[in-house]
Amino acid sequence: MTTDEHGGGAGPRAADEHGGGAGPRAADEHGRIDPPFAGDEMSTLRGFLDFHRRTLAWKLEGLTRDQLAATHPPSTMTLGGMLKHLAYVEDSWFGEVFLGREPSEPWRSTDWQADADWDWHSAVDDDPADVLTLWKESVARSDAALEAAADGLDTLGVRPWRGTGEPLSLRWIVVHMIEEYCRHNGHADLLREAIDGSTGE
């Protein structure tokens, strides 16, 4: 598969399509575009989120089903499981928390009490192309939510933070998603190197 096939969108985008930057900026060899250097807050945060989504896509590029299911003991983490987990995280934060939607499939029918890490564990039984499609579709839904936010990053999510009941801004959710991808891209670096020796930031 090519990097574009893994990407969270229709293809490499120029930084100024998010509202910042001085003009079209070329993608690197992995389909990533640097976030705008002097953009507004929305364009900067979306630029970083897109960059790290594409970094994850690159780390999975060209792997077989067996390689996507490979672990690096003592961890049970897999790259296929990571991709499915991030599809779930996209839908959970942007769809359920921000928009107030009910969970979509396959999350709706999952018995999370039986396996709290089902998204990670179940990927080994999935066709990699299906997991990739699941992730790409979740990213597209997240991007649509960002585009439609009436008050931009100040827009409050429908569902409050569990435990305190405090509302969550779209700004908080986007920053949290960047953090989520950054953490897992670090894991992906180690897993990919253990699989075939590939390295790179």
Image: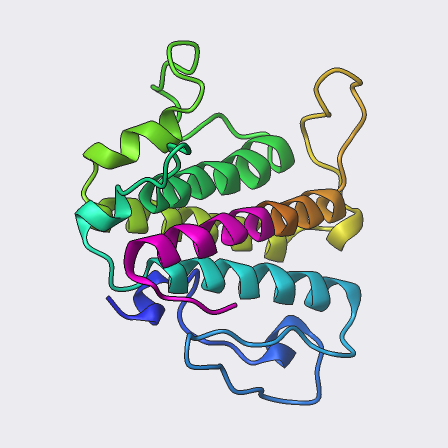
Residue 16 on the magenta span: no
Residue 105 visible in image: no
Percent position of residue 29, x then y: 42, 81
Give whichever of 73, 170 is nearer the camera: 73
> Could you tell me which residue is drawn at 40 percent across and 69 percent down?
10
Residue 73 visible in image: yes
Give, as a single range, the part of the protein colored magenta. 181-201
Percent position of residue 24, x then y: 58, 88
Give whichever of 149, 121 is nearer the camera: 121
Quadrant (top left, top right, bottom left, bottom right) of the N terminus: bottom left
> Could you tell me which residue is drawn at 51 percent across and 38 percent down?
89
Q: Is residue 181 above or below residue 93?
A: below
Our reading of the magenta stretch's main secondary structure is helix
Residue 193 on the magenta span: yes
Q: Is residue 16 above or below residue 186?
A: below
Percent position of residue 110, x then y: 35, 19
Q: Residue furthest top?
A: 113
Horizontal side of residue 194 vs 63, given as left or right: right
Percent position of residue 27, x then y: 49, 82
> Could you tell me which residue is drawn at 39 percent across and 60 percent down?
59
Give whichever of 155, 48 is nearer the camera: 48
Q: Is residue 62 above or below residue 160?
A: below
Q: How many marks on residues?
A: 0
| Quadrant of residue 169 within the rendered picture | top right
> Could you tell me which residue is drawn at 19 percent across and 54 percent down?
64
Q: How is the image coloured?
A: rainbow
Horizontal side of residue 93 vs 192, given as left or right: right
